[in-house]
């Protein structure tokens, strides 16, 4: 798993994505104004994704499952991609838990 820290031309230009070994996006962030804030967001996802209670399992308007990861104060720190089914979502959560702690950040 790798974590891609990206900068765009947006007003809040910094975002990150957790990408698995197959190149699929597992979790993406909100936009951040400062690079340091985005890096703090990465650490928050790494920490909170290890705790089952921090996952909010949801379904999109088109019926596809996804999840949010919340911090201790209830703020969403990461949102997953949409998955084909709940089995795929569960596999992504397991992969995130197993691989995120050692994931390398690239810019």
Image (tube, helix red, strand yellow):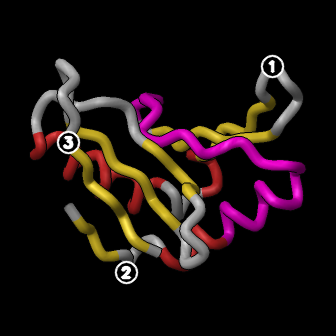
Q: Earlier in the sequence, mark 3 or mark 1?
A: 3
Whether tag 3 and tag 1 are in contact, CB under 8 A, the answer is: no
Q: Which of marks 2 and 1 is nearer the N terminus?
A: 1
List the residue tagged with mark 1. Answer: 61
Secondary structure at numbered mark 1: loop
When the figure is inspected, residue 12 is found, relative to residue 88, above or below; the finding is above
Q: Which of 73 and 14 is in front in this view?
A: 14
Q: Residue at x 37, y 32 (%)?
A: 30
Distance between the Cα atoms at labels 3 and 1? 29 Å
**In this picture, residue 74 sits left or right of residue 37:** right
**In this picture, residue 104 sits left or right of residue 75:** left
List the residue tagged with mark 3. Answer: 7
The image quadrant that residue 7 belongs to is top left
Query: In the rendering, at what x and y percent does residue 26 appear?
Result: 57, 56
Secondary structure at numbered mark 2: loop
In the image, which is nearer the foreground, mark 3 or mark 1?
3
User: Is residue 79 highlighted in magenta?
Assistant: yes
Query: In the rendering, at what x and y percent does residue 76 appear?
Result: 46, 32
Residue interval drawn in magenta: 73-94
């Amino acid at each position: 798993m790798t974590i891609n820290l990206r900068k765009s031309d947006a007003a809040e230009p910094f975002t990150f994505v957790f990408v698995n070994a197959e190149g699929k996006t597992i979790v993406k962030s909100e936009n951040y104004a400062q690079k340091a804030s985005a890096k703090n967001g990465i650490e928050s996802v790494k920490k909170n994704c290890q705790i089952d209670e921090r996952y909010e399992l949801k379904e999109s308007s088109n019926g596809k499952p996804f999840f949010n990861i919340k911090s201790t104060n209830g703020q969403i720190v990461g949102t997953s991609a949409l998955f084909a089914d709940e089995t795929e979502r569960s596999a992504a959560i397991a992969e995130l838990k197993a691989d995120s702690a050692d994931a390398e950040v690239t810019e």
